Image (cartoon, coloured by chain):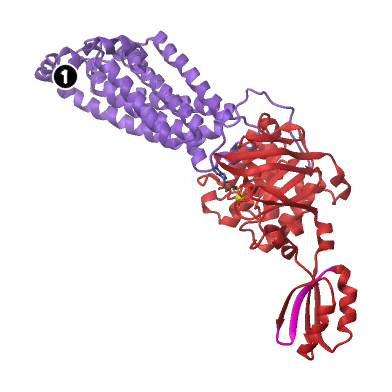
Chain colours: A purple, B red
């Protein structure tokens, strides 16, 4: 029997990406549906809000600092964009996307390692750095797939209740949330790769995300927090109210660029340590 | 890359390839986990075409050695190299020609064996369609269904899958950590043929085990490890030559057993009524027969000792 394999293929050709994507399909579909259900639910309540001047006034009369947890541009609850931003993009949307990304990020290295599978998987010509990078790419693709699906769900649900939403801004808002999710997912990959401990990766992401969320939301209340606000990923993900103001490409690029050294540090530490058994 | 030496139809055994170059070399290799020294100043080499059995009691450091060789662990002293490449620093290059069966292989349970083999091919940058013939031929030979989900496979069948994963790409270096665990005797025979073919094709094989009897059947040479140190390193043929014989004699008159006192080289003597069992060195067999000729013997059995018995002393007490 003779098996002839063609000439060596490109070093850039992914080795584990396709398999990783296929394995994550179920999680990706699950998160898309969960988040899509939430979008539909909020859309269903929009007509009631639109018609209730009282609720809108109530929101507008909240102390400014408190209101800033829900909106940064001062858009009230009386516009569809303001409503969806406050309900969906101020907390629940980013939170669910973050959880999806964290799950994928933890699984990438620490999860496989805890199950004892990494020994065999990494006894192949795939380097540890390549393993980390391809899993980060798969994670980004999965998160963007969730956000793309739910942008479409939101456009459809918004149209169904005649919410006055700009399609371009809807897409922009989901891209912003997705990029934030990718940043935290990569943090999970990096901590998992550096330590091999899934729980530690989850705790780290949880603490960093909570701190960044509070810094961004409470910035108007304290000069100290205000000075820290530029360090918060949420400042760039939701601080612009993209559903109201559209895409902020510079801010997205900034978030993605800062993820790179995080990933590089994780890969570097991964290459220097023993695999756990 | 050309994978034209399909394993299942490998060429007949070529003993001469045992004299090939040294493929695996551990040089003053050491591994500490905190205070605990799992491997200490280890010198070990395996030639191309050679099968070396790696023996030792629980916790001796066998798995640690193999994981140092796969680059999963970083040495704390010395070095491990495969074909001149450092197992830690050049791990991906080493892995191109490496097959590894971990102890208790952990595999993704939700997918089929075929999917895992596809992934392995992809990680080795081999097209799935090019890899499949060799993979399926091996699976057939081991009687393994690749279309079933790994989670549904029995323990022994999972072990077979681990063997297929390690062998399909015809590695030049094979590291096997207690690979026959869970395999039934028929499959063990097939596995032994596979190993022989792999070695005959020029691969260096390091195989860990607890049972000398098993390694004896697979290996050309045996290395025994104890508390992280090599305590024996010998050719299986040589060992066998020096191994004592086990003798069982039944005397017509139990008192006649005293003739054994005149034979030097008798050890481990145990009497049970008129029956006496003992071991005797080869050089003393002539004396033994002469001594037995002077009394009435009703039954006699002499057999080659299991190497196990020889090694009990090296292990120090219980194996
Ligand atoms: N990651 C680790 N951290 C700490 N100690 C370890 C680690 N891996 C192995 N050890 C210790 O190193 C020693 C050697 O273990 P190893 O697994 O190499 O033994 P072994 O010869 O394979 O034993 P067995 O026959 O039971 O498989 C043991 O004392 C073990 O507890
Ligand atoms: Mg072991």
Location of mark 1 (residue): A50
Q: Is mark 1 within 8 Å of ligand 1?
A: no
Task: Tell me the quarter of the picture where residue A162 sits.
Answer: top left
Task: Tell me the quarter of the picture where residue B305 sits.
Answer: bottom right
Give the x, y percent position of residue B293.
89, 84
Observer able to see residue A162: no
Q: Label the magenta part by its dominant secondary structure.
A: strand
The quadrant the N terminus of chain B occupies is: top right
Farthest residue, direction bottom: B253
Q: Is residue A227 left or right of residue B305?
A: left
Q: Is residue B116 above or below residue A67?
A: below
The quadrant the C terminus of chain B occupies is: bottom right
Q: Residues within 10 Å of mark 1 (few under 14, many from 20)?
A: some
Residue at screen point 51% across, 50% down = B151
Considering the numbered disc 1 on the image, is that residue within a helix, a strand or a loop?
helix
Q: Is residue A175 left or right of residue B227?
A: left
In this view, the residue in front, B172 or B34, is: B34
Residue at screen point 67% across, 23% down = A10
Q: Is residue B119 above or below residue A132?
A: below
In this view, the residue in front, B210 or A259, is: B210
Give the x, y percent position of residue B146.
61, 49
| Bounds of the magenta segment | B272-281
Q: Is residue B163 left or right of residue A157?
A: right
| A174 is within the stretch colored magenta | no
Q: Chain of mark 1?
A: A
Give the x, y percent position of residue B280.
81, 71
Residue at screen point 87% across, 71% down = B284
């Amino acid at each position: 029997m003779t098996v002839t394999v063609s000439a060596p293929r490109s070093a850039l050709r992914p080795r584990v990406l396709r398999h990783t994507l296929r394995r994550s399909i179920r999680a990706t579909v699950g998160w898309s549906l969960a988040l899509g259900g939430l979008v539909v639910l909020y859309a269903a309540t929009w007509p009631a809000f639109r018609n209730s001047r009282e609720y809108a006034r109530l929101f507008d009369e909240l102390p400014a600092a408190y209101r800033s947890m829900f909106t940064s541009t001062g858009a009230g609850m009386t516009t569809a964009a303001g409503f969806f931003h406050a309900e969906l993009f101020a907390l629940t949307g980013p939170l669910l996307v973050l959880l999806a990304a964290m799950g994928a990020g933890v699984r990438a290295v620490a999860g496989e390692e805890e199950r004892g599978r990494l020994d065999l998987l990494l006894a192949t010509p795939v380097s540890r750095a390549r393993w980390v990078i391809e899993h980060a790419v798969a994670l980004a693709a999965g998160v963007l797939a969730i956000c793309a699906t739910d942008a479409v769900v939101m456009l459809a649900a918004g149209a169904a209740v005649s919410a006055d939403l700009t399609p371009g801004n809807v897409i922009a808002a989901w891209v912003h949330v997705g990029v934030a999710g990718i940043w935290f997912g990569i943090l999970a990959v990096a901590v998992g790769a550096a330590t091999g401990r899934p729980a530690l990766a989850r705790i780290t992401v949880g603490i960093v995300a909570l701190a960044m969320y509070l810094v961004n939301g409470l910035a108007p209340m304290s000069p100290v927090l205000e000075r820290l606000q530029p360090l918060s990923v949420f400042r760039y993900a939701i601080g612009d109210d993209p559903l109201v103001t559209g895409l902020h490409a510079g801010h997205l690029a900034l978030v993605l660029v800062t993820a790179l050294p995080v990933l590089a540090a994780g890969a570097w530490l991964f290459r220097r340590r023993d695999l756990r058994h | 890359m050309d994978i034209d030496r399909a394993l299942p139809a490998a060429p007949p055994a070529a003993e001469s390839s045992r004299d090939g170059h040294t493929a695996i070399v551990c040089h003053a290799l050491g591994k500490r986990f905190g205070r605990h020294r799992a491997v200490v100043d280890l010198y070990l080499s395996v030639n191309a075409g050679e099968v070396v059995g790696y023996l030792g009691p629980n916790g001796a450091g066998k798995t640690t050695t193999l994981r140092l060789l796969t680059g999963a662990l970083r040495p704390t002293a010395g070095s491990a190299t495969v074909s001149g490449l450092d197992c830690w620093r050049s791990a991906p290059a080493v892995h191109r020609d490496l097959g590894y069966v971990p102890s208790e292989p952990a595999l993704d349970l939700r997918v089929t064996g075929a999917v895992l083999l596809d992934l392995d091919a992809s990680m080795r940058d081999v097209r799935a369609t090019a890899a499949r013939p060799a993979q399926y031929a091996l699976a057939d030979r081991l009687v393994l269904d690749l279309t079933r989900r790994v989670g549904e496979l029995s323990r022994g069948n999972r072990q077979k899958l681990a063997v297929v994963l390690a062998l399909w790409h015809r590695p030049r270096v094979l590291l096997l950590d207690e690979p026959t665990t869970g395999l039934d005797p028929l499959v063990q025979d097939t596995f032994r043929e596979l190993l022989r073919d792999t070695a005959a094709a020029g691969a260096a094989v390091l195989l860990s085990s607890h049972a000398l009897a098993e390694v004896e059947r697979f290996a050309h040479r045996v290395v025994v490890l104890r508390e992280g140190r090599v305590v024996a390193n010998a050719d299986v043929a040589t060992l066998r030559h020096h191994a004592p014989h086990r003798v069982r004699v039944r005397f017509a008159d139990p008192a006649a057993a005293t003739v054994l006192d005149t034979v030097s080289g008798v050890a481990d003597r145990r009497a049970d009524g008129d029956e006496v069992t003992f071991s005797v060195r080869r050089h003393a067999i002539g004396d033994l027969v002469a001594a037995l000729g002077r009394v009435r013997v009703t039954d006699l059995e002499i057999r080659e000792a299991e190497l196990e018995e020889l090694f009990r002393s090296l292990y120090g007490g219980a194996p």
